[in-house]
Image: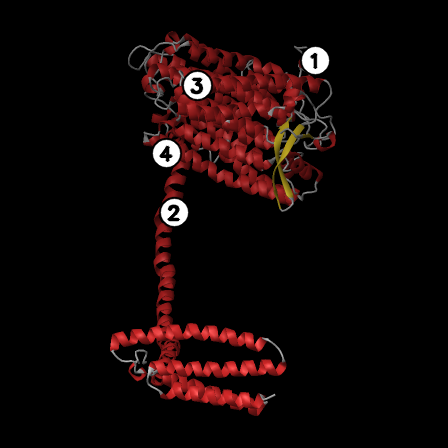
Amino acid sequence: MYLNEMLLLGAVLFCIGVYGVLARRNGVLVLMSIELILNAVNINLVAFGAFHDTVQGQIFALFVITVAAAEVGIGLAIVLLLYRNRRSIDLDQVDLMKG
Amino acid sequence: MLNANIAAAETAGKAVAASGWFLENAWLIWLFPAVSFLLILLFGKRFPRGGSEIGIAAVGASFVFSLLTAIQWISEVEGGAGGALTQSITWLTNDGQAIGAGIMIDGLAVMMIFVVTVVSLLVHIYSTDYVAGDRRYTHFFAFLSLFTASMLFFVTASTTLQMLVGWELVGVCSFVLIGHWWEEKDNSDAALKAFFTNRVGDMGLIIGVSILFFGAGTFSVIGVNEAAITGSMSHTVTLAAALCLTAAVISKSGQFFLHTWLPDAMAGPTPVSALIHAATMVVAGIFMVARLYGVFFEGFSIGGSSINTLALIGGLTTLVGATLAFVQNDIKRVLAYSTVSQLGYMVLALGVGAWTAALFHLFTHAFFKACLFLGSGSVSHAVHSFDMKKDMGGLRKAMPHTYRTFMIGTVALAGLPIMSGFWSKDEILVGTGGWGLFGGTGGNGAYTVMLAMGMVTAALTGAYMTRVVYLTFFGEFRGHGTPHESGPRITVPLWILGGLAIVAGFINFPAGFQLVPASWEEKFLHWVEPVGVSYFPTIKHATPSWTLAIVSVIVALIGIGAAYYYYFVRVRAVSPVATELPDGPTSRSAVARLGHRILVNKYYLDWLYTTVIVGFVKGPLAKAAYWTNQNVIDRVVNEAGTRSVQAGNIVYHKVDQLVVDGIVNATGKISDSSGEELRRIQTGKVQQYAAIMFAAATILAGIFIIVI
C-alpha cells in the first residue's frame, strides 16, 4: 500500500490549509483553506480505511463532506452579510469581539 | 361510658358493691343540667319563657333520677350491699399513667345528689318569679344550670382530679352569679372578692391533690383513702395533704379566717344565695372532707385525741359566725353569717369524728337554710330592701306564708325539738363525745372544748334568729308603701322547704330513742355511712344521751329567752317601730361598746386583708419592687446592653471590616486585575484565535508524541 504517500499528501494539504487560514485576509479564501484542512482529514480517513480494509473510513469521509458543505454555506452567508455592511471582506477589520 | 367497667367488689371494699340501672347511669343526672346550660346559652332567648323552662325541665329530670337513684340505693343497702359503685373510663394517659374519670356512687353521693337537685329545682321555680323581667334572665338560668351540673359532677366524682374540676366549676358559677348585677360596683367587687378568696384555698386543693397523687400513686378517691387508712402512705404525707385540703375547705366552706367572702356574696340575687351560698356550693368543702375522710381521719389522728386543726377551725368558725350575725342590719347578711356558723358546726363534727352527724346536719341545714334565704328573698321582694331596721317590721300580717315558713326555718335553725335542726345539732354535740357529765360516751375522742363551743353557739343562734324575727316580722312596719305576700311560685317552694325542714330530721332518730320503733332509728346513718369498706376509716359512734339533748335545748332556750326579753319586751315597750334600746348596754358600758365595735368591724378581718395585706402589697412592697426594678433589674439590662454595643463595635471594626470585607475585596481585586491582563489576548481577530489554537494543538501533539 502507499499509505505513507497518502499521509504525506494529507499533511501537505493540511499545512497549506493552515497557512491559508492564518495568513490570508480574504474571508472567502479563509473558508476555502478550511475546506483544504477538512479534505486533508478526509484523505487520511479514506487512506486508513483502505489500509485496514474497512468501510468506516469512507463513511466518515462522507459525513465530513456533508458537514463541510453546510459549514461553507453558513460561512459564505456570513461573508456575504459582512460585505453588505462594510463593503469589505477583510477579516482584520472584523474585530467587534475585541475585549 | 359504653365500655364502662363496673368495679369489682374487691376494689370498692369488702362490702358487696351495689348495682342497679339508676346507680350505674347516675352520670345522666349531671348530664341533664350540663346540656341544659348549653341549650339555654345558645337558644334560650328564643324560648317563650327565656330558657327557664329548659332549666326547670333538666333539673326536674335530674331530681326524678336522683329520687330513683336514692330509692334504688336504699333498697340495695337494705338488701345487704354497701360498697361504692364506681364506673370509670380512661380520661387520658400520660407516661403510662392512665388517669380515669367516672362516677362513684355510694350513700354520700346519693345523699348529696338528692339535696342538690331538690334545692336546685325549688330555686329554679322560685327564680322564675324572683328575677322575672331581669335583663339577663336567660343568662341567669343558664348559670343556675351550669352550677347544678358542676355540683352534681363534683359529688359523683370518682377521682380527686375530677373533684378539682367540679370544685373550680362551682367557684366560677358562684363568681358569675354573685356578679349577676355587675353594673353596681359593689356587686362586681363582691364577686371578685369571692373568687379571689376561693383561689387562695384552691391552691391548697391543687397542692393537696398533688401530694395525695404522689403519696398514693393514684387519683382515685378509693385508692387515696385506702392508702391513707392502710398506712401505705406515710403519716407525714397524709398530714401535709390533709392540711392543704383544709385550706381549701376554709375558703370554699367559709371557715374562719377566710369566711369574709361569704357575707359579701349576698350581693348576688337571693335565689343564688339560697342555692349556692347556703345549701350546696359552700358545702362542697364539707363534702370533700367527707369524701376523703380516710386522709383527714388518719392525717389529723382524729380518733382518740381531744383537739385537732379541723375541729378547732370548725369550733372557732361557728362562734365567729354566730357572734357576727348579731350586728348585721341586712337580713341576708345575718343568714350568711348564720351559714358560716352552721358550716363551722359541720367542720367541727368532721373534726371530732362525727362523720354522719356532719352530713346529717348538712342535709337538714340545706333545707331550713334554703327556706330561710328564700323567705328573706320573699320579704325583700315585697319591701324592695334587705335592711331590717329601716324597711321592715310588722310583716307577719302582710306576708303570712313567708312569716310561717320563716318561723319554721328559724326554729329548725335554733335547734328546738322536733325540728330537723334539733336532731342533727344534737348528734354533733353527742359526737364530740367529750363530756362524761352528760353521758356522751363512746366518741372518737374527748373533744370537750368543741362541745363547749357548740353549746355557746346553740345559745347565740337562738338569740340572733329571735332578733331577726322581731326586726322583720314584729313591731310596726318602718318602710314605705304596703307590702304584699309574694306569688305562688315563691310561696310554694317556701312551704315545701319548710315541710322538709320539719321532717328531714326524722330520718335519723338517735339509737336507743325510746319514743319510736327501733327500725326507725339511724336510717340516715345506715344509708349514708359506708360500713365494712376499705376506703372508709373505722369510726366510733357516740352514745346519745337524754341529758345532753335536754341541756342543749335549755341552752338554746336561754339564748332565745334573752333575745326575746330584750326585743319583744324591752324594745317594744319603747316604741313599736324601735329597733334597739335608747339606753342599751352599748351606751352604758365601755366593754360592751368595744365588743360592739369589734363585731361591727367583723373582727377587723376585712381591715386586715384590705388595709394591711393589700395595703402593704400596694404601698411599701410595690415601692420596693419598683426600686428593685429600676436599680437592679434595669441596671443589669442596661449594663448588658452597653456591653453588647461595645462588643459589637469591636466585632465590626476588627472582624467585619478587616477580615471579612478584606477577603471579599481581595477576591474582587484579583479578578479585576487578572481580567485586565487576560483581555489583551481577546483581540476579536479570528485568525489570531486560530493561530493560538493551532499552536496549542501543535504543542499538545508534540507533548503527546514525546510522552507516548
At 45% from the left and 83% from the top, the residue drawn is A37
Other residues around mark 3 within 10 Å, as few (<14) / some (14–19) / many (≥20): many
Q: Which chain does tag 1 point to?
A: B
Give the mark toward the camera: 4 or 1: 4
Task: Name the quadrant of the C terminus of chain B.
Answer: bottom right
Contact, CB < 8 Å: mark 4 with mark 1?
A: no
Hey, which quadrant is residue B572 in on the image? Answer: top left
The Cα–Cα distance between marks 3 and 2, rounded to whole angstroms, is 44 Å
**In the rendered view, would you say B567 is above or below B204?**
above
Where residue B620 appears, as percent x and y from the top left, is: 36, 50
Kind of residue sitting beneath label 2: Val
**Residue type (three-letter) at the residue carrying disc 3:** Ser
- Quarter placement of the N terminus of chain B: top right
- Which circle, 3 or 2, is nearer the viewer? 3
Q: Give the SS element for disc 2.
A: helix
Image coordinates for residue B707, horizontal then vertical, percent: 57, 90
Q: Nearer the viewer, mark 1 or mark 3?
A: 3
> Residue B189: which disc?
4
Q: Is residue A54 above or below residue B92?
A: below
Between residue B705 and residue B54, name the one nearer to us: B705
Which of disc 2 and disc 3 is earlier in sequence? 3
Q: Which mark is residue B617?
A: 2
Task: Decide: few, some or many residues near mark 4? Use Cα within 10 Å; few <14, some 14-19, many ≥20.
Answer: some
